[in-house]
Image (tube, helix red, strand yellow):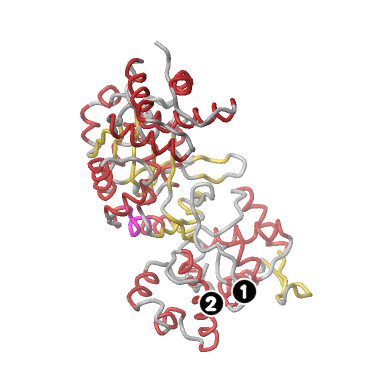
Amino acid sequence: MRLSDLLVALDLVPRADVNEALTQQSRTGRPLGDVLVEMGLLSARQVTELQDGLPAPPDTLAQLGIEQRIILDIFCKYLSTAGQGTTASIAETLAISRRLSSSLIESARAQNIVELKPGIVAGELRVELTPRGRSMAVEAFANNSYIGPLPVSLADYSARVLKQTIRSEHVQPRIVAGALHPLAVPDDLLAKVGIAVNSGRSILLYGAPGNGKTSIAERMVRMFGAMVLVPHCFEVGGQIVKVFDPSVHRRLGIEAQSSSVASLLADEFDPRWVPCRRPFVSAGGELSLDMLDLKFETTARFYEAPLHVKAMNGVLLIDDFGRQLARPEALLNRWVVPMDRRIDFLKLHTGQSFQIPFDQLLVFSTNLSPRDLMDPAFLRRLPYKIHVHGPDEREFAKILLASARDRGIAYPEAAVHFTIRAIAENATPLAFYQAVEIPQQIAELCAFANRPMLADEATIGFALGNILVQQ
């Protein structure tokens, strides 16, 4: 991963300008940041702030911060599986620089773990395991079968989490409004959401179903613009814990390079870290207590991080709270200490426990009564309890007409009044979802029956007959 990729991914510098800067860097040998400043593309302060936030690529094996045994185990397992390797293939697999890959090969040669083989692949010498190296690979596979990027240390991971805390960003009102668009959110609710997000503390969204609680929660992560670094995995007690998950983490800087010059440059920060947007993780009725613990793969013998660790530095939504497999009080008790002290404790299958930061915007969403779900002591731990209420008649009519217009449905004023009156006669409160769903069903009916796109008593009655439960 290169600084040039991140500049493009973060929309700081256009790709064409970055390629021009890379060409100048190749010609002069000067740091890319200095070239960008001279070209007037970034200020010196912007370059400094970005580079200060990136971990430098390790120059030595010791600077990796993990035991050499772990490094050699993964190295030997890779060569045992691949049959042979080169400086480039080892660097790519272990997520280290080519310079460090060369150092690792030389160290392994000195210990009679690998040997050079005749022939050149892509301009590089081949290396293979010696009998001693193959024996080490067998022992390493007995411990675990993990092959991939080298882990970072638990200490480095914890420090990085605290450095890029969700509380470090201040969200402006216009950002909140933009993130929630096109939802119909009243100004008072918009302000409550913005203030709660800025606090970085736990949030409870409650109210009748169909009024946008989940939609609001899902859009909260859009309010944050900062990049966060997520490790492929970390090491604790000699065990590997995988963190980076492509299904959760939106990776930055993966655009294919259009400049051959860029591919010749060394990595500009530690490639064991993946630059990502702040993550969003949602768990609904399927959530159980064991999903909040480390998942030990008994065959592979390494761990998968639980969902709240994958959500670190981002947003974690507990949707439909109260309808989970686990009892509400059990889930709440699991999070009492993390919510109060912003730390969590996880346990390895060996029995060893370790501490990890708890840094995410934790959002509970429910259409049940909060007083029925939690006692006063836990309600106190949720400083932002936001009631997401349904629309009044004016708001409902506005959304209904806008939705009808988007679908090409003519919706006379008399039809609007008929719709509102019919919902009330069904003893059902108005909800935002109704104002969107009714025109959708009318459009589907008219298309099917080949009739004019018009909302009248017949088509409205058809839609309400599907949407509402008859009394």
| 296 or 342: nearer the viewer | 342
Residue 335 shown left or right of residue 114 in the figure:
left
Under mark 2, the amino acid is Asn
Q: Which residues are magenta?
A: 160-166
Residue 369: percent from the left, percent from the top? 29, 24
**Magenta stretch contains residue 411:** no
Q: Which mark identifies residue 460? A: none
Residue 401: percent from the left, percent from the top? 38, 35
In the rendered view of the protein, which quadrant contains the C terminus? top left
Q: Which mark identifies residue 106? A: 1
Numbered disc 2: secondary structure: helix
Classed neighbour count for the residue bearing mark 1: other residues with Cα under 10 Å, few (<14), some (14–19), many (≥20): some
Please identify the quarter of the rendering in which residue 421 is found: top left
Residue 109: percent from the left, percent from the top? 65, 71
Which residue is identified by label 2?
19
| 431 or 127: nearer the viewer | 431
What residue sits 36% from the left and 54% below the top?
224
Of tags 2 and 1, the one toward the viewer is 2
Q: Is residue 35 above or below residue 143?
A: below
Under mark 1, the amino acid is Glu
| 138 or 45: nearer the viewer | 45
| Residue that lies at the very extreme toward the right in this rendered image | 118
What residue sits 29% from the left and 47% below the top?
197
Numbered disc 1: secondary structure: helix
Q: Earlier in the sequence, mark 2 or mark 1?
A: 2
Please identify the quarter of the rendering in which residue 380 is found: top left
Please identify the quarter of the rendering in which residue 128 is found: bottom right
Classed neighbour count for the residue bearing mark 2: other residues with Cα under 10 Å, few (<14), some (14–19), many (≥20): some
